[in-house]
């Protein structure tokens, strides 16, 4: 008996030894600079050298600065980096070569930076070629490098792509720098659907039907958008293919056709339909067929949001007398109420990690963005005395929340960190903005 | 000389002031149609209903009278004129915050609407449900639908044929009063009745 236990213990010890060898041996395991799950992160000082202008023409230099500025804004936004300003350092810092052999890392240690980005740009007509490299200054080591070819209109995109590459290599997690936010703006006088980059640039209007268009929602691959529209004098759900720019009718059942939360795992779209005479939660196939009713209740049920594993749905229901958030499984079973504080809690959005739900909660007549654990614990309010704050939407990495706010009078799209800090305006249309929906990470393979 | 000129100025002045007043009051009497149909935001200002034809140049007053005579000469009202007449008589109903239950007042108004509709068995009605701006968009779309349905169901119990009534919810999208006040919100929580051609 005792021998047996000893045998077990030695087995466990050997296992621990083997695991620790892999974990602590940095030669085998790539170095993780950034722990994305750490509650508080140490900010990495990073220097971004000016891009070397290969043909030394003014336009090319300007493009180089544009790439550098976007890169700098991305990395600052991420919250993982502090940007070291190299403007005040001698000119040879920027003029030196861009490969590992050409860089004098000793010199760069004086800037206080631990990481360094070096790059070069070549511009011919409206074609650009940009190469970028990331180095570890303290170890004098190359971390990653990429070369991008594109048009002068792609400069921001190129910078976003390299920002993603940096975050991927340093943290092992996909960044959100080339994600987009779909939203509604009444800039033209009508509520139309728009797209913008996560940072508010590249605003593009998708619809122009001059009616009321609402609630854009992304397909899991980020290549299609579901939205509601009154453009035919009844309210229907449409699916817009962003690649082909082709639109199909997804649901034109009698009554409401709202929402459109498309789950990657089970390939079902959760919607609100009132075809049975009262708004209920349904799921349906991606072509709108095969509807399955999940709630059957006299009260109002709206706004379904999937858990990331596709096993659960959060939604808003007035079955207790006031709108509250509920959770049920994907068959409509195991129903439980999630929110109990306040008398108007709505618009749930399940976090990509699956542990939290963001929602809009009315306090003293105004809506605020709140967050709660899926077991109902740890309710937190993230906005205070700042107009109506509604429609929370998580970034695909779960580190940010987009929402709409009327804090300056007009309704605009804002972004905050997922702990509520650093709330900043990103919406830049001239109208009132609402319904932000953050895209998944879009893989475009280049 | 001077006196003569003064008189002329006075007469011309009077014409300038009085003539538009006369014409305007004429128009105002004709434009009794309140198009409280779908365009909440555009419901103010001059009407573009059937009376719009009266809006002409000052020298064309006789023609205006001719158009009016034609309409009055008809035995029964038809088309737009009929719609306008019913639309004028039929009234909106209002709701309490976050409620779709019909109040006593709302039921009284619906009874009145039902008696009007029963006089014109051929017209159909689109009942539009609306909410005030407080609340989330999706919830309000559902709430507006419940309000429209509540109105519809009550009209059916009052004997209006189900097939004449359809519903749509605009949620908080089409406020009657765009202000952000209790008074505006009370006006905006409504169901209105758009008469549609058969």
Image (cartoon, coloured by chain):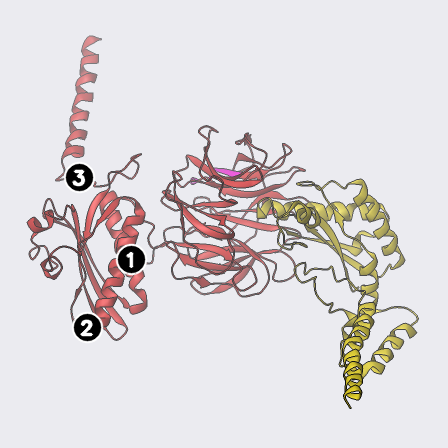
Chain colours: A red, B yellow
Quadrant where the N terminus of chain A lies? top left
Query: Which stretch is magenta?
Result: A308-314
Indicate which label's residue lies in the foreground, 3 or 1.
1
> Which labelled disc corresponds to residue A29?
3
Residue B84 belongs to magenta span: no
Determine the chain carrying the residue at label 2. A
The answer to whether tags 3 and 2 share a subunit is: yes
Comparing A177 with A343, the one in front is: A343
Residue at 84% over, 66% down: B82
Coordinates of residue A170 in the picture (x, y in percent): 22, 45
In the image, residue B52 sits, relative to residue A181, either above or below, namely below
- Whole-number angstrom distance, CA of label 3 to CA of label 2: 43 Å
Instruction: Report helix, strand or loop for mark 2.
Output: loop
Q: Are marks 1 and 2 on the same chain?
A: yes
Q: Is residue A291 visible?
A: no
Q: Which mark is residue A70?
A: 1
Q: Report the residue at 64% width, 55% height from top.
A: B174
Q: Which mark is residue A345?
A: none
Chain on which label 1 sits: A
Horizontal relation, residue A11 to residue A321: left or right: left
Q: Residue furthest bottom?
A: B1
Query: Pointer 3 indicates a residue of which chain?
Result: A
Residue pointed to by mark 2? A57
């Amino acid at each position: 008996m005792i021998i047996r236990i000893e045998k077990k213990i030695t087995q466990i010890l050997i296992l621990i030894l083997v695991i620790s060898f892999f974990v602590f041996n940095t030669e085998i395991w790539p170095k993780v600079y950034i722990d994305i799950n750490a509650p508080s992160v140490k900010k990495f000082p990073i220097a971004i050298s000016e891009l070397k202008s290969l043909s030394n023409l003014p336009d090319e230099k300007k493009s180089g600065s544009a790439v550098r500025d976007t890169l700098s804004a991305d990395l600052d936004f991420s919250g993982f980096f502090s940007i070291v300003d190299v403007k005040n350092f001698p000119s040879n810092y920027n003029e030196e070569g861009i490969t590992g052999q050409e860089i004098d890392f000793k010199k760069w240690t004086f800037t206080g930076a631990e990481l360094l980005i070096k790059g070069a740009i070549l511009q011919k007509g409206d074609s650009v070629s940009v190469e970028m490299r990331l180095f570890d200054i303290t170890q004098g080591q190359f971390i990653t490098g990429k070369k991008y070819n594109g048009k002068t209109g792609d400069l921001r995109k190129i910078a976003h792509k390299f920002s993603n590459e940096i975050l991927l290599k340093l943290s092992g997690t996909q960044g959100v720098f080339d994600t987009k936010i779909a939203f509604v703006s009444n800039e033209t006088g009508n509520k139309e659907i728009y797209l913008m980059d996560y940072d508010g640039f590249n605003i593009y209007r998708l619809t122009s039907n001059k009616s009321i268009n609402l609630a854009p929602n992304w397909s899991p691959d980020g290549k299609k958008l579901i939205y509601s529209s009154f453009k035919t004098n009844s309210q229907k759900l449409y699916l817009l293919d962003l690649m082909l720019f082709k639109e199909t009718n997804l649901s034109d059942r009698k009554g409401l056709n709202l929402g459109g939360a498309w789950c990657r795992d089970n390939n079902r779209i959760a919607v609100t339909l009132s075809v049975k005479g009262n708004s209920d939660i349904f799921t349906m196939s991606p072509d709108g067929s095969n509807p399955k009713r999940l709630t059957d209740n006299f009260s109002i049920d709206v706004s379904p949001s999937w858990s990331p594993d596709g096993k659960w749905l959060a939604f808003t229901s007035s079955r207790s007398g006031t709108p509250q958030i509920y959770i049920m499984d994907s068959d409509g079973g195991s129903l439980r109420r999630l929110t109990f504080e306040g008398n108007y809690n709505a618009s749930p959005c399940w976090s990509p990690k699956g542990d939290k739900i963001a929602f809009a909660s009315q306090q003293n007549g105004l809506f605020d963005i709140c967050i709660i654990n899926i077991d109902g614990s740890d309710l937190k309010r993230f906005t205070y005395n700042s107009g109506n704050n509604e429609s929370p939407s998580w970034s695909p990495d779960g580190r940010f929340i987009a929402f709409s706010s009327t804090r300056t009078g007009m309704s605009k799209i804002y972004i905050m960190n997922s702990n509520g800090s650093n709330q900043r305006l990103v919406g830049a249309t001239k109208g009132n903005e609402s319904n932000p929906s953050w895209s998944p990470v879009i893989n475009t393979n280049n | 000389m001077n006196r003569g000129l003064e008189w002329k100025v006075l007469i011309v002045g009077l014409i300038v002031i009085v003539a538009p007043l006369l014409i305007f009051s004429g128009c105002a009497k004709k434009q009794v149609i309140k198009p409280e149909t779908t365009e909440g935001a555009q419901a103010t200002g001059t009407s573009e209903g059937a009376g719009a034809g009266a809006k002409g140049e000052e020298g064309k007053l006789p023609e205006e009278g001719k158009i009016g005579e034609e309409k009055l000469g008809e035995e029964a009202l038809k088309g737009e004129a009929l719609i306008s007449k019913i639309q004028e008589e039929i009234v909106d109903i209002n709701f309490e915050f976050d409620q779709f239950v019909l109040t006593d007042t709302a039921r009284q108004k619906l009874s009145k609407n039902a008696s009007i509709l029963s006089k014109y068995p051929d017209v159909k009605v689109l009942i539009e449900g609306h909410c005030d701006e407080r609340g989330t968009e999706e919830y309000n779309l559902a709430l507006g639908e419940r309000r429209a349905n509540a109105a519809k169901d009550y009209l059916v119990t009052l004997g209006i044929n189900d097939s004449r009534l359809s519903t749509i919810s605009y949620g908080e999208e089409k406020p009657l009063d765009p202000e952000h006040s209790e008074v505006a919100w009370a006006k905006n929580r409504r169901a209105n009745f758009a008469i549609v051609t058969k």
